Image: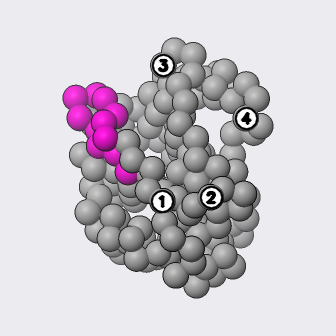
Amino acid sequence: MRLLVTSDTHVPARAKHLPQALLACVDEADVVIHAGDWTDEATLDLLESRSRRLIAVYGNNDGPALRHRLPEVARAELGGLRFAVVHETGPAVRREARCAERFPGVDVLVFGHSHIPWDSTGPGGMRLLNPGSPTDRRRQPHHTFLTFTVADGELRETTLHRLPGKE
């Protein structure tokens, strides 16, 4: 099962549209995960129409319309792994321990908000993943998103994709 993970797209404030490289990977993915801060419904509509399956949450910059359509936390079992998706996890200090307490029984926690790619393992083996942002790199050297596969209850082939500047 091929997954694409993105967050903090902030269209149209940070980019006029999603990067073509990201959309090409959306078309190839079995599941697309978006960890919030869409800022417009058109981007949600686009990913819903192009994704085989979309798992998504709202973020702190998403208004009432997006909050009406999306949950604060999403959960799914994919390829034998239990996933949770949330926008904010708080400060980096003690993140793994805090998230292990907040999301017991979760194998993979996907989050956004910071625009900083993150890949760590917490107490009990929970994997924490943040894809960064494909449109707003902030203090990072690149715009980014993640892809990976899930097979036999394991994450495999985790790739942080680096994108050029705004398209």
Q: CA distance from mark 2 to mark 4?
A: 19 Å
Residue 63, percent from left and from top: 71, 69
Q: Compare marks 1 and 3 and give the one earlier in the sequence.
A: 3
Main secondary structure of the magenta stretch: strand
Q: Is residue 16 above or below residue 144?
A: below
- Element type at marker 3? helix
Circle 2 Cα neighbour tier, 10 Å, few/some/many (<14 / 14–19 / ≥20):
few
Q: Where, by quadrant of the figure, is residue 79 drawn?
A: top left
Is 129 placed left or right of 112 in the picture? left
Q: Give the residue number, with chain letter if any, for mark 2.
A: 141
Q: Give the residue number, with chain letter if any, for mark 4.
A: 92
Q: Compare marks 2 and 4 and give the one earlier in the sequence.
A: 4
Q: Residue at x 31, y 41 (%)?
A: 157
Q: Compare marks 4 and 3 and give the one earlier in the sequence.
A: 4
- Element type at marker 2? loop
Circle 3 Cα neighbour tier, 10 Å, few/some/many (<14 / 14–19 / ≥20):
few
Q: Where, by quadrant of the figure, is residue 22 drawn?
A: bottom left
Q: CA distance from mark 2 to mark 3?
A: 29 Å
Q: Are marks 2 and 1 in contact (CB under 8 Å)?
A: yes
| The label number, if any, that marks residue 162 in the structure image | 1
Q: Is residue 146 visible?
A: yes
What amino acid is labelled 3 in the image?
Gly
